Amino acid sequence: MRSLRALTASVLLAAPAFAHEPSETTRKLSFPRLGDGRYVMAVDLHTHSVFSDGMVWPTIRVQEAQKDGLGALAVTEHLEYQPKKADIPHPDRNRSYELALAEARPRPLRERDPEKDLLVIPGAEVTRGMPPGHVNAVFIKDANKLIKTDARAAFEEANAQGAFVFWNHPYWTAQTPDGVARMTDMHRDLIRAGLLHGVEVANGQDLSPEALDIAFEYNLTVLGTSDVHGLVDWDYDIANGGHRTATLVLTRDLTPEGFKAALKAGDTVAIFKGSLVGRPQHVEAVVKGNLSLNVGVPPAGVKMTPVTFRNTAPIDFILELQGPESFYDAGRLITVPAHGEFTAQVRNTPNPSAVGLTFVVMNTQVGRDTALTVRYGAAPAGAGR
Ligand SMILES: [Zn+2]
Ligand SMILES: [Zn+2]
């Protein structure tokens, strides 16, 4: 039986600092470094402010990103859509970047800490009919120069500036009424010419399995972005444990050049409504880097093995047990909570002192209809060494 003292302590530990305000740990999209030394850097490369059709000043975008523990943010205003121009005239299209950059400067003034401080990346949204639809260019040098009559010329200019360029919401119903992302000849040409490097598989509240297929088939980087126009806290119900849609960049180097190289290499996972979406090797790296299994010793006289999962990620992992084993005190579907643990007893295992378990991680997507399968503990019987 649980003592009252232990119960009180655990209630105190679980209580947030303020009612209805998620704690720092649960809000932040912070992940520990992977075993191979890479950082898991959460970035949002698609947001808006009042300098296009967003509802907030760029400083708010920075403050939200800092609260969310992001490593990098881009405020990407529509170049060709300026509904607030009469109220907020701004002939220099780099203005919202400059304001965000100033806000992100460490205070008190000190050297930037790459592991803690937010990077603000210059970017813009090239806003066209389909094709090419909407496209973000980030790591640009001058947004003004991307305003072109010819859409392809905007891609060429962005690339001349060294940009990373990705296709936004390719399934957006305003441009694709059935909500299904499809390639066009123009997109094929742009990819062939090396002018288009990534595609959003998740944008705001939407996810596109077809965009994931396109990313795999055309070797494009997988991205998730918020495309937030209002407030992150309201759009994503942060108070109740929600998080913005974002991209996890697996990178050895947290500098702008370093994480741009990881983006270009396609080393990313989209994070969307508590799920990880991307190439199997990248999703597995994040799962294995955050979810560990400790196999205990069967108690005397009992042929069952205690196992404890520990999760260091800010999202839950929902696991479905595969194979002949079963849990004595849980069903086949278990949840290892964010920053938490799950303990159970394993039975029906061929060797109780060398337990190996296979799971499907239900809240992952590594193909249009596939979730990631992972193995923990001893290799299955008959597997090669
Ligand atoms: Zn757009
Ligand atoms: Zn947008």
Image: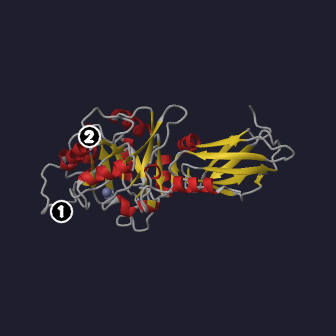
181 vs 367, left or right, is left
Name the secondary structure under disc 1. Answer: loop
Residue at point 80%, 50% (across, down):
347
At which x and y percent is residue 192?
A: 39, 42
Please identify, in this view, whether the residue under mark 2 or under mark 1 is nearer the observer: 2
Residue at point 54%, 48% (across, down):
339
Name the secondary structure under disc 2. Answer: loop
299 vs 367, left or right, is right
Q: Distance between the residues labelled 2 and 1?
A: 31 Å
Q: Earlier in the sequence, mark 2 or mark 1?
A: 1
Ligand 2, by image quadrant, is: bottom left
Residue at point 77%, 55% (across, down):
328
The residue labelled by disc 2 is 107
Disc 1 residue type? Lys
Q: Can residue 136 be seen in this view?
A: yes
Residue at point 20%, 42% (across, down):
142
At which x and y percent is residue 113?
A: 34, 34
Please tell me how crowded label 2 is: few (under 14), some (14-19), or many (20+) other residues with Cα within 10 Å: few
Disc 2 residue type? Arg
Q: In which quarter of the image is the N terminus?
A: bottom right
Q: Which of 126 and 258 is in front in this view?
A: 258
Mark 1 and mark 2 in contact (Cβ < 8 Å)? no
Please tell me how crowded label 1 is: few (under 14), some (14-19), or many (20+) other residues with Cα within 10 Å: some
Residue at the bottom extreme, as displayed: 177
The residue labelled by disc 1 is 84
At which x and y percent is residue 107?
A: 26, 40
358 vs 172, left or right, is right
Q: Which of 68 and 154 is in front in this view?
A: 68
353 vs 251, left or right, is right
